[in-house]
Each structure stands twice: as C-alpha cells, then as structure tokens.
Amino acid sequence: MGLTETLSKPGEMFGDMFQVATLDNVVQWGQSFSLWPYPFATACCGIEYMSTACADYDIARFGAERPSFSPRQADMILVLGTITYKMAPVLRQIYDQLAEPKFVISVGACASSGGMFHTYGVLQGVDRILPVDVYVPGCPPRPEAILDALVKLQKKVQSQGLEARRQEVMRKIEEINERNKPLVVA
C-alpha cells in the first residue's frame, strides 16, 4: 500500500504528523494570506476602506494589514471611488508597476460602473482599463462588503494556479486593448 493509495487527494492529512500538498498549493495558500493592498482612493469609498483597518473590522485577520503606498511593494490594487478619464492613464501606470501576480478589486458603484456620474469626464467602470477580479457593490459599500471581497479574492488565489492566472489576465488585457483601440476611418 503506497502513499497514493493512502491519500485520496493532495492536502489531505496523513495521520497527525504531516500534510501532503503540491508546491503550487502551498504557494497559493501563502499568497492568498499575504495580499498587500495599494489603495487608490479618490472618493468616499476610501473612507470606508480606512475603517476596515480599524479594530472593529480588522483587515489584519485576512493578511492584508499592510497597505502599501508604493505600487512596487503591492500586489493588489483597490480602486476606491470615481475615476476620471484624466486619471485613467495614471491608474493604468500604477497597475503596470504592481508586483506579479496582480489583483484588482473595484470598490463601490463609481469604480465599478461610473456610479451616478454619467458624464463625459468619468470613466464608466475601471474594467475598461484594468482586469478586475472582484467587484464590491454599494455607494459607498460597507466595510463588511470590502472584507467579503478580500475573502473572495483569497479563495480565487487559492484555487487558481499561477499559469492559469497569467493566461486570464492576458486575455482580459487583450480584450481591454481591443475595446479601447481607436477607430480609424479610411
């Protein structure tokens, strides 16, 4: 009777001594509990995000207690609030500077769909320039909703391999670039 017959799947406990898992599973588990957020706050959703770091909601329980204000030291960007067309290239540049693999959470109605600002100067959803992983509804969303989005992102990181993640992001970026291609009339 070998080890493969004893264990039905990776991650199963083998007695009280050790647990068998693949290296990818261990890396995904560790990465899911060490997401370092870069808060890109432009409106009232930023205030709600600040309350998640306080004692009542305590984002540290989920491994994201270290907000980074340098994109090179973060791997997750939280877009919090209204994004104008003038700010869109800056947001995209910050996204490009994030550490790999990159994750995006769109927080609030304004970041997700432009909110109540259906004007010529407001971007109608950050998914037009960034590959969004999780959307948080609300105007502004409650801190519990932001924490729920973080938990959903953690589950996504744990279940998705690095290569699958890379392919998903590349597909989304190609769609974004195709959608934003300028119209050329001959």
Image (cartoon, rainbow, N blue to C red):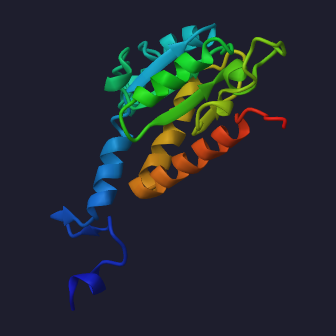
For image coordinates 64% across by 39% down, the residue present is 177
Measuring from the top left, give residue 161's x and y in whole percent. 42, 57
For image coordinates 79% across by 34% down, the residue present is 183
For image coordinates 63% across by 7% down, the residue present is 44
Q: Residue furthest left?
A: 17
Q: Residue furthest bottom?
A: 1
Image quadrant in which the C terminus is located:
top right
Q: Is residue 26 above or below residue 84?
A: below
Measuring from the top left, give residue 126's x and y in whole percent. 65, 27
User: Which one is nearer the viewer's eye here, 96 or 186?
Assistant: 186
Question: From the viewer's perspective, is 121 left or right of 151?
Answer: right
* One can see residue 161 in this view: no
Question: From the viewer's perspective, is 21 left or right of 80?
Answer: left
Question: From the viewer's perspective, is 92 left or right of 184?
Answer: left
Hey, which quadrant is residue 70 in on the image?
Answer: top left
* One can see residue 72 in this view: yes
Measuring from the top left, give residue 5's x and y in whole percent. 29, 86
Q: Is residue 42 above or below residue 89?
A: above
